[in-house]
Amino acid sequence: MHAEILSIGTELLLGEITDTNAQYISSRLRDIGVNVYRRITVGDNPGRLLSAFEDSIQRADVVIATGGLGPTDDDVTARCLALALKRNLSFDENAWDSMRKLFIERRWTSTGSDRKQAYIIDGGFFIPNHVGTAPGQGIMIDGKLALLLPGPPSEMKPMFENYVIPLIREHFPSLAPIHYVNLNIAGLGEARVAEALADLLGCPNPTVAPYAGAGQVRLRIAAHGCDKGEALAMISKVEKEVRRRLGHHVYGKNEETLEMALGTLLGRIGLTLAVAESVTGGLICHRLTEVPGSSKYFKMGMVAYSPKVKIANLGVPPEVVYRDQSVNEEAAGSMAESVRLLAGTDLGLATTGFAGPEGGTRDEPLGTVYIGLSHKKAGISIHKLIYPSSRPRAKAYAAQRALYVLYRFLVEHYGKRR
Amino acid sequence: MHAEILSIGTELLLGEITDTNAQYISSRLRDIGVNVYRRITVGDNPGRLLSAFEDSIQRADVVIATGGLGPTDDDVTARCLALALKRNLSFDENAWDSMRKLFIERRWTSTGSDRKQAYIIDGGFFIPNHVGTAPGQGIMIDGKLALLLPGPPSEMKPMFENYVIPLIREHFPSLAPIHYVNLNIAGLGEARVAEALADLLGCPNPTVAPYAGAGQVRLRIAAHGCDKGEALAMISKVEKEVRRRLGHHVYGKNEETLEMALGTLLGRIGLTLAVAESVTGGLICHRLTEVPGSSKYFKMGMVAYSPKVKIANLGVPPEVVYRDQSVNEEAAGSMAESVRLLAGTDLGLATTGFAGPEGGTRDEPLGTVYIGLSHKKAGISIHKLIYPSSRPRAKAYAAQRALYVLYRFLVEHYGKRR
């Protein structure tokens, strides 16, 4: 039992809009246990759309298409599906009534071409659209389900949730939803994670798969084909083993970001934080303040982008600021310590380095970043990394690493759990 | 002459990530005059991937696939394309050398599995990746071009620009590129832009189309079917008319961001800037420092996230800080003025407001933001906006508006052009 998703619209093929529908439908089908084997994007071209429908209906049990249901001549989706199924389209009074109801409610005036949208494939059924004018439709044929939904996400999503999911569940009652957990990992590359978990990555159930992101790896543990309790137990067993092997590199679960994990940790321990940024230019503060409630522990950030500011406002000694353009251990340490004292917080975190494209000295090449961490009792620690890249990537990587340095310090000094 | 794009990765079919690669490649191919007829997404499944390659190569002149070039066993893209073309893969010393160069540069340690990525289809060529480990590759066969690129956009994009576009142009010299310009607009919503340009939006050539983004609108003016000089003249005429109607709302062209436009303007006028952020939490500083050379005019940022810091470190009067939780005109003005004086710059920009989900007072509801701007001679000006939304969106919107306030001030006081 598997599905294919068709995204229809020339504007997609021109790259003018991002296809978020296909992603949304994919993830919701996955949740209810439907495998998506293929997604296809075609334009509003009758020939290619017809052939795409023919192929998908032949291969898949469920075909869901979005787009091309509008009133204009280039909206050909329903006609092409009818052709692929060798059926006719007929005017459907129920579909038309539901459209008219919306027109009256919204005080829209109907153009003559609107009636076109009320034509439904013979033997099929219409799917009401309570947000826009184009009704959806579907047909069950030879045990297969074909469904057409409008392209605008604000119309498609409620129709998918309220009609399509119940319909699929009704027609395929034996579906087993997939259960899963995502573990978020920092401070290790994808290759290192794969190496540490080599034996687990080969398992058929639960499956374990790493996905690389910017300075982090997401590990998906998914179990299928068993009841919920059994699946969760299987996942939990593998999760424990992963955590045992990767230790504090696993900072979060599912949608938890590093800044969220840090927020939880700082909140629990009851520590406050100030940040002094040079190379990361405000990105660390920006990430920390994306977390609701961050004002409870994050007190102050200082983006010290000029030598003068580092000296006059942060109090870093001039000889340190002018050595290697402030890219040195002492500068990172002094910035972390100074911002902590200035803000009166428990912790100070600082970055200094060369983001590029210019900069770098004989001793400290482009891409060099020093991260300083100051704690009121544990004192100052310094971490160095070299990551020459584009300016945005260098900043992103340095910020991620700085947050991880802080996370790791907290876990090591205060423990992870209550 | 047309192309198909394959996006490869089970994580795509699971809906875990948005496929921005397909959109990017679509729009860039459109720019150089290549029609994309179909996009296909398949997982890391050898059978289905093989059949997708076979179909696409049969139908299209150019096939571009992204994803599945990594070192792990589930990365099967190169093997499947080789199978589809009935060719073998061989270890390529040049590809391996280019990988090793990056490893040495970045001081990464190679795991044994990395070598796998240096296997190239017989008769093909490798495409260097200067950002990540996985090289791309391509092959010209029976007049058709098949190209494989890594999935991470930061690696794919430079490879696409630097190698793939020249390659396609070389192999298909008769391509007629579409000429266009994108105008970037701030301080006006999409509906307002459409209203002001209603007559232009209906024109067949050049076409004019607005696309809404976060706090900005992008207007695409595109000409087709004529020689370059003629096309550029047509575009330039429409561009002038748009600029005449929208004035300083048009801040930039093509890839120029608001922070880049600001950087150019500040650099030209010779003014320096300091920023004090409360509600935007570092995002303004982060955006300003994404621009290479920003250290020339951006000197200091202060993220004053606690009342104590606003008072002790910025010098905002306590009675202002404690009124409506610092969300008031005087706080914004005082923050802008103080940070300017602290940093010794010509300009100070400040934000204060409620990003949510908590906050808001009787007088100042959730979503209220004050933007303060201080200039050494023109004094202080304050702007208010109300934009209740999710925390990340509220921050993004406030930051965009603050940058626009500064941009507008500079244009009005110093003029836009030299």
Image (tube, coloured by chain):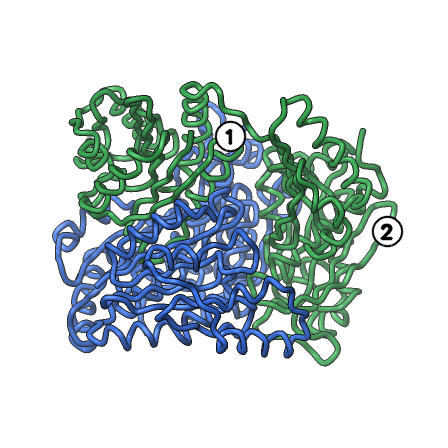
Chain colours: A blue, B green
Q: Which amino acid lies under the numbered mark 1 shown in the image of this protein?
A: Gly
Between A378 and A26, the one nearer to me in the picture:
A26
Q: Residues within 10 Å of mark 2 (few under 14, many from 20)?
A: few
* Front residue of this view, candidates B266 and A21: A21
Q: Relative to B414, is A336 on the left or the right?
A: left
The residue marked by circle 2 belongs to what chain? B
Q: Is residue B229 rendered to the left or right of residue B381?
A: left
Q: Quadrant of residue B144?
A: top left
Which chain letter goes with mark 1? B
Q: In which quadrant of the rendered image does the C terminus of chain A lie?
A: bottom left
> Which amino acid, mark 2?
Gly
- Residue closer to the observer: B115 or B150: B150
Whether the residues at callouts 2 and 1 have beta carbons within 8 Å, the answer is no
The image shows residue A308, relative to residue A122, as above or below, that is above
For mark 1, give the secondary structure. loop
Position of B99 with respect to A368 (left or right) is: left
- How far separated are the C-alphas under marks 2 and 1? 51 Å
Which residue in the structure is indicated by mark 1?
B33
Quadrant of the image containing the N terminus of chain A: bottom left
- For the point 26% across and 74% down, which residue is it? A171
User: Is residue B202 something that shows in the picture?
Assistant: yes
